[in-house]
Image (cartoon, rainbow, N blue to C red):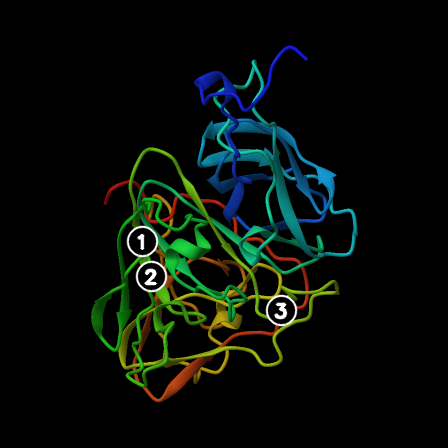
Amino acid sequence: ATACGTSAPSGAGTFTFLPLPTVTGLAPAHGSVAGGSTVTLTGSGFTTVTAVDFGGVAATGVTIVSDQELTASVPADPVTAGGTLNVTVTATCATAATADATSCGTNVVVPADQFVYYPTTAQIVTRTLEPGWNTLSIPFPLAQGDQSLDAILGVSPGAPSPVLAAYAFFNGHWQPVPAAGERDFGGDGEPGGALQPMVGLFVMIGGSQPVTATMIPAGVPTGSVGTPSSPNTPPTLPLTRGWNLAGPSAPLGSEPYSDFLAGVETGTVPILIDPNGTDVPVVQPQGDTADSVQNGFAYWIYASQGDQSLVGQILTGPVAGSGGNGFGRGR
């Protein structure tokens, strides 16, 4: 024997137990079965993360932004039919080369780390919003639990919102729409009035980069593998006498003006104004099949009488709202 007893405590004899990394959010938390999109993960202990897996399949392009944030490119869905998988991150434990490690091992899976793959035929509508004022409308009831503007824009909890202001024109009055909350316009206590199908909004986006609103119909499964189904009934939107701000619910992404006015008595909508783009055309919509309206956009409709409703359509195919520059920059 060369020693006897217990050593005295010293810095050299200290062993540190590091916590597991955590994943508290994904933005966006959904994507195509084809993969390829970029997802931002928030959580803790990301400093020495070396692997990100979607249901056991490795992601590529992992970039550590900070100890609380990283980005990764989503791999193709291993199930190939759509469904929900857990996302895990694995951090390298501290060594001489990774002495700054803040975690060690693989996170415990929780609902916040779930990613939903949608079949490529899912009826997801996207709408690119440029800096400045844009119009926006929701074509159908949404699948997202949080149906706020920030939710469809993929804003992570606690992150700054790109929305500087948002308004809906409802019952002849401008109504502010909070970016991170839901507004009840009906007065019945039910949330989500601002984002109800076909209600038109004006949204001002700050910064210098465009953002994308992703709208997923309620018929698409969010918790199990399966084929997306359409909402059972088409949405409707009551018109009041005078000006109304509304958007379409078109099965193929766009539809003629005359189809947009389905359910409205002929001749009672003499004027439709398209405020999207660089010019503002005034349309005589009755019987017009040459021009069309697009999902995700909003239009001014003048009704000479009330007590009638726009009627949307049941969505039965892949749709995608085109980009466009909305109402223009900073008007």
Q: Residue furthest bottom?
A: 307
Type of the residue with mark 3: Leu
Q: Which mark is residue 201?
A: 2
Q: Residue furthest left?
A: 173
Q: Position of residue 263 (x, y in %)?
A: 48, 83
Q: CA distance from mark 2 to mark 3?
A: 21 Å
Q: Position of residue 155 (x, y in %)?
A: 41, 48
Q: CA distance from mark 2 to mark 1?
A: 6 Å
Q: Closest to the observer: 155 or 149?
A: 155
- Kindly identify which residue carries mark 1: 203
Q: Closest to the observer: 196 or 2?
A: 2
Circle 3: element type? loop
Q: Position of residue 17 (x, y in %)?
A: 53, 34
Type of the residue with mark 1: Val
Type of the residue with mark 2: Leu
Q: Closest to the observer: 269 or 87?
A: 87
The 10 Å Cα crowd at callout 2, few under 14, some 14 to 19, many 20 or more, is: many
Residue at point 33% right, 49% down?
Answer: 327
Quadrant in which residue 178 is drawn? bottom left
Mark 2 or mark 3: name the one nearer the start of the chain. 2
The 10 Å Cα crowd at callout 3, few under 14, some 14 to 19, many 20 or more, is: many
Circle 2: element type? strand
Mark 3 or mark 1: name the one nearer the start of the chain. 1
Drawn side of residue 194 relative to residue 198, left or right: left
Q: CA distance from mark 3 to mark 1?
A: 25 Å
Q: Closest to the observer: 30 or 256?
A: 30
Q: Quick check: 89 above or below 314?
A: above
Q: Quick check: 45 above or below 327?
A: above
Drawn side of residue 175 relative to residue 303, left or right: left
- Kindly identify which residue carries mark 3: 315
Pointer 2 with pointer 1, Cβ within 8 A: yes
